Amino acid sequence: MMQVILRQGNLYMLQGRDPGKLFNLYNNTRNQGRKMLCISRIHPDQLKEKYGIPQDQTLWISQTVGSRNLNPQNMGILTETVVRFLSTNVNSIVFLEGLEYLMAQNDFAKILKFINHVYEVTAIYRGIMVFSMDPRVFSAREMAFLDKCAIMIHENDEPVIRMSD
């Protein structure tokens, strides 16, 4: 296992089938005083119960209407939400679980456009965004595109975010 230090101004893709590592990273970073947002396909009640993630820091990717829900087919609103959070909270961190679901609801070009836009915003505002993703969902060509936008963290690596970074 290799430790990977996550640095400000970057996007990271955390590869693996289990999103638990993403949520553990969230919890391990919680005491650093950074603003954090968790966007997930997992219902906020389940996130709180299983991982202890506060509901006021989560948005749910869902087709149902709700004040803290994001429609997976509206990539514009998702992009705007992430950009607004990163641009109004310098040095903040966004955690996204559900890239596979977004792929099922949109074409890859929309996903790639979203990721590229978020990369630019993280670079400008010194934020960090971490996606969890199952690489089996993406073709080799799509993975190559993603690899150009984000730093890949492999399933056996241990991601760490430090306040000084």
Image (spheres, grey):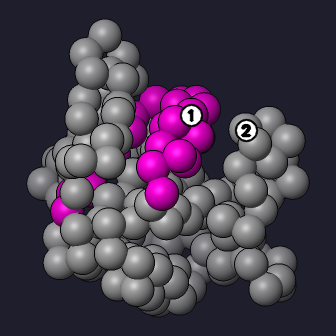
Image coordinates of residue 15 in percent, x first then y, are: 39, 34
Residue sitting nearer the eye, 160 or 152: 160
Taking 39 as reference, is 3 left or right?
Answer: left
User: Which residue corresponds to the image point at 35% horizontal and 84% vertical from the top-left?
Assistant: 87
Tell me, yes or no, whether the two marked residues, 1 and 2, touch with CB atoms within 8 Å.
yes
- In-front residue for pair 92/18: 92
Is residue 143 visible in the rendered structure shown here? no
Q: For mark 2, what is the residue?
A: 51
Reply above or below: 59 against 87.
above
Instruction: Determine the residue positioned at 80% across, 36% down.
Output: 50
Position of the N terminus, as image quadrant, is top left
| Residue positioned 63% across, 58% down in the render | 40
Residue type at tag 1? Asn
Q: CA distance from mark 1 to mark 2?
A: 7 Å
- Residue lying furthest top: 1
Disc 2 marks which amino acid? Tyr
Disc 2 packing (10 Å; few <14; some 14–19; many ≥20): some
